[in-house]
């Protein structure tokens, strides 16, 4: 076997063993009854999505618009994180093992592929095995990866970022033809579109900026010409990808779409203190600073700026030692650009606005980019730092023991907090959905409300597990709620569980039921909220079965249904 191929396989195996050792024990080596991640309902979005695309296509249903959630209105799949690229690629596995197992396999493989693609990039830069392995570990097992591994498949699957840079270097060195480069970059762009459009938009911006930085920092005419050619070919690849995606792009912008920002780019910006202070996701020191880190900007699932002092020191030493090289200056410049951009349009610390405008403010109102969360740009910073660390470990004049001691310390400082209770969650599906009760009480295609509602509960998971037997007058594919549900106060009451928040609750609840033809409420037990009071205006006695309280709603349109008429006297309090 070729020695280079053997080295690559060894690196891949090392990353795979590390990922399995870290996360398989967390799910008790049971990929069918636990998922890798937190108890948040966000993983259920992606489990649902893995099921939706193959199911819709095999049932000859338009997969771009789903009327099984937020029914009967439905929701477009083009402005939500429904990950069609991953769903379609994993279709054979999903049909064999189900969406939960496939989700776990993707979660396990994400750091492996991220690390391996960063290793390939670092190997091209350094031509050294162990420094390249170090760079792969830093990127693939970064704080960014661990933070998003808890909930966000669309963000923890980031192997395509170092892969694109590696392809550019191969083209730059003449190891890849222009035709192949354009084809492969186009394919990566199409894949990223089907994974997360926000990352495609930011990767396009910062990728082109990186090529421009390389052109600016190069002094030789030949190098400048090569980067100019690379810029043209990259733009051509994006145009080819855009042409291939044009039907979807037209559908995106012609149809129903969100206007303006979805989230605040100020709130979801990197916290400056987080670069030095770990959150509880990190094993070393995470719990010690918990009181402080809870005041950081953003949410727990987005705080990924922690690099640790050893890794930051490596970056400083790299800058000091290699600044005279053009490629190093490119790394430094693009690293500074993406890191400053990650701070958002206005500098803040501990959620206090310092009223200092930052460069990202100029991009904050551009189409697509205005919907991007700056804190997520840290993925590019992690890639830059990983390459810097590999380069420094390979070529620094520092003593070997000092280099590898600092490298080991950098990995120790970002090691995940494995004892923390946020790396797995049991797949606790009520027996109602599997013991025949669902088929007994709920007709195929019935529109129901699953409580707890939306992002508070796991209705999306239950629907995916039951292969879309029922529709839901609700759902959760992110914080976008389609009309007419946005204009109805009843969903807010479901979310909060407090009828006092909605005046004339009974009348509005009955109108919600009639307008959306809701046939049942399925309340998962136990429930922290007082659902009987919430549903009291319906005057329905619940049926307790299979760990749920089932409220079958009396509806005029069922009276003429021979199939369901026999259920009414026994199941409903008239």
Image (tube, helix red, strand yellow):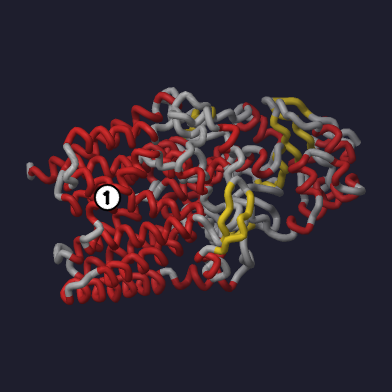
Mark 1 packing: few (<14 Cα in 10 Å), some, or many (20+)?
many
Residue in the image at 39% along x and 46% along y:
90
Q: Mark 1 points at which residue?
A: 318
Q: How far across and down, in percent of the image, does residue 147 sit?
A: 47, 40
- Position of the C terminus, as image quadrant, is top right
Residue in front for this viewpoint, 429 or 305: 305
Residue in front for this viewpoint, 83 or 436: 83
Q: How far across and down, in percent of the image, does residue 56 sit?
A: 52, 53
Residue in the image at 61% along x and 55% along y:
354
Q: In this view, does 50 lie to the left or right of 570?
A: left
Query: Compared with residue 525, is residue 169 higher up or lower down, i.e. above or below?
Result: below
Q: In which quarter of the image is residue 453?
A: top right
Q: In this view, does 39 lie to the left or right of 493?
A: left
Using the rendered image of the protein, determine whether residue 382 is visible from the camera's viewpoint: yes
Element assignment for label 1: helix
Using the rendered image of the protein, determine whether residue 569 is visible from the camera's viewpoint: no
Q: In this view, does 349 lie to the left or right of 211?
A: right
Residue in the image at 32% along x and 58% along y:
332
């Amino acid at each position: 076997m070729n020695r280079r191929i053997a080295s690559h396989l060894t690196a891949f195996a090392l990353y795979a063993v590390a990922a399995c050792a870290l996360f398989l024990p967390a799910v008790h080596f049971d990929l069918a009854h636990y998922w890798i991640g937190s108890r948040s309902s966000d993983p259920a979005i992606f489990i649902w999505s893995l099921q939706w695309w193959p199911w819709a296509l095999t049932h000859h249903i338009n997969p771009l618009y789903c009327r099984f959630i937020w029914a009967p209105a439905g929701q477009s799949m083009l402005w939500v994180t429904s990950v069609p690229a991953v769903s379609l690629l994993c279709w054979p596995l999903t049909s064999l093992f189900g969406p939960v197992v496939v989700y776990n396999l993707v979660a396990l493989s994400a750091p492996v592929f991220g690390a391996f693609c960063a290793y390939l990039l670092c190997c091209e830069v350094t031509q050294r095995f162990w420094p390249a392995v170090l760079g792969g570990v830093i990127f693939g097992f970064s704080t960014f990866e661990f933070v998003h591994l808890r909930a966000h498949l669309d963000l923890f699957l980031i192997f395509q970022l170092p892969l694109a840079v590696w392809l550019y270097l191969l083209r730059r060195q003449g190891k890849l033809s222009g035709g192949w480069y354009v084809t492969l970059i186009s394919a990566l762009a199409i894949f990223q579109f089907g994974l997360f459009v926000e990352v495609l938009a930011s990767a396009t911006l910062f990728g082109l900026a990186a090529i421009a930085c390389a052109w600016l920092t190069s002094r030789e005419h030949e190098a400048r010409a090569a980067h100019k050619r690379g810029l043209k070919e990259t733009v051509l690849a994006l145009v080819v990808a855009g042409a291939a995606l044009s039907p979807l792009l037209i559908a995106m912008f012609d149809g129903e779409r969100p206007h303006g920002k979805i989230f605040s780019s100020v709130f979801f910006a990197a916290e400056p203190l987080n670069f030095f202070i770990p959150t509880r996701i990190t094993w070393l020191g995470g719990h010690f600073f918990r009181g402080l880190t809870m005041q950081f900007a953003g949410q727990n699932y987005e705080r990924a700026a922690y690099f640790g002092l050893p890794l930051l020191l490596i970056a400083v030493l790299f800058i000091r030692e290699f600044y005279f090289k053009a490629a190093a200056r490119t790394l430094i410049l693009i690293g500074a650009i993406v890191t400053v951009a990650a701070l958002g349009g206005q500098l803040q610390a501990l959620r206090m606005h310092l009223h200092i405008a930052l460069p990202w403010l100029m991009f904050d109102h551009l189409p697509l980019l205005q919907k991007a969360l700056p804190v997520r740009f840290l993925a590019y910073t992690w890639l830059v730092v990983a390459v810097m660390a590999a380069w420094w470990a390979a070529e620094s004049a520092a003593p070997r023991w000092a280099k590898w001691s600092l490298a080991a310390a950098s990995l120790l400082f970002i090691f995940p907090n494995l004892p923390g209770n946020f790396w797995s969650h049991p797949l606790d599906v009520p027996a109602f959905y599997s013991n025949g009760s669902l088929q007994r009480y709920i007709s195929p295609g019935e529109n129901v409300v699953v409580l707890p509602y939306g992002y508070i509960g796991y209705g999306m998971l239950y629907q995916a597990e039951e292969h879309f037997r029922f529709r839901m007058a609700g759902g959760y594919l992110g914080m976008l709620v389609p009309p007419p549900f946005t204009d109805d106060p009843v969903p807010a009451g479901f979310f909060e569980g407090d009828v006092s928040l909605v005046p004339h609750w009974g009348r509005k609840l009955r109108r919600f039921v009639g307008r959306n033809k809701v046939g049942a409420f399925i309340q998962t037990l136990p429930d922290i909220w007082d659902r009987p009071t919430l549903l009291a205006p319906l005057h329905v006695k619940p049926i307790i079965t299979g760990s749920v309280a089932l409220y079958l709603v009396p509806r005029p349109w069922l009276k003429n249904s021979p199939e369901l008429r026999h259920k009414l006297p026994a199941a409903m309090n008239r």
